[in-house]
Image: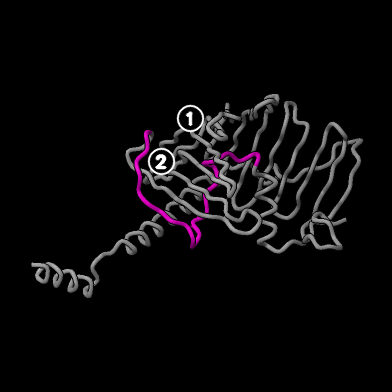
Amino acid sequence: MRLRLFVPCVLLALAGCPRKTDDTAALAAQVKQRLAERDTKLGGYHIAGTVKDEGQDEVPFSFDYRAPQRMRGTLGTPATRIFSWDGTHLFEQLDGEKRFTTFKSELPPAKLAGFLTETFGVFTPEGFRAPLVSHGATLRRVKHPRAPEAVELAVTLGGEAQGLELVYVLRWPGLDFLDKRSRAPDGTQAEVRMEEEHCDAALALCVPRRLTRWLGGRKVGETVLSRVELNSPPPNDTFTLTAPEGYDVKTRTLVEATPENPPTGG
């Protein structure tokens, strides 16, 4: 009996019988494709809202994005700090100190992308930026209270974040953000949960409207969007700033950090 069951399995395998690894590879390919399609749909938008962290005052913010790489973020109402990248220059405007700085970049493309992600990450809530499906990532289909079908994407980071485990849960098939969990090497666990969302039928996707942040099972922060405008790319000149009258104006250069040079150059 064992032989009769075993032989067909071997024949099917030789003929290209689907295996678990094949299913995982196919799922990874679909996820990458759908994330790219989602990024295309989110090619231009404006959001505004507030960020509240435990023990701190609520901070109003706004963010404008236009593909492929133009970003503008403001903090405060009225704005007290503005960062903007117009594709070639970074602008920083500090209204309280009346300072205006223009940065030109000499960073390699990969380093520049990382720098911009770090600079504008505070303005872009989860669900507006896609997680990277790296070669070390694992994917599987799961269920979630907010989605009959979902995909779990797990990855362990290297480099400066060595050992940090990240797990994203995305609604299938649109890959709308549902949840993000992290676990540090020391066992510290954190989570970002989607509590409310804004859905656009024309774009066939949803983005978070309210997110909560948790640390060790305790709520420590919340982001609430009061305004979400999708599929409305801001004009290019939105991202090129000019110094207001009376501001101290400087020009600096972004360079790679070395023992001789600070990260932002001089």
Q: Position of residue 211 (x, y in %)?
A: 53, 32
> What is the quadrant of residue 3 in the picture?
bottom left
187 is higher (above) or lower (below) than 14: above
181 lies left or right of 250: left
Query: Which quadrant holds the N terminus?
Result: bottom left
Residue at the spot x=54%, y=45% of the render? 183
Q: Which mark is residue 73?
A: none
235 lies left or right of 100: left
Q: Which mark is residue 204?
A: 2
Q: Position of residue 189 (x, y in %)?
A: 55, 40
Q: Which residue is mark 1?
A: 195
| Residue 240 magenta | no
Helix, strand or loop: magenta stretch: loop
Seen from the viewer's position, the closer of residues 102 and 61 is: 61
Q: Position of residue 166 (x, y in %)?
A: 52, 48
> What is the quadrant of residue 249 in the picture?
top right
Give amino acid for label 2.
Ala
Residue at the spot x=82%, y=49% of the render? 102
Extent of the magenta region: 122-145
Give amino acid for label 1.
Glu
Seen from the viewer's position, the closer of residues 121 and 48 is: 121
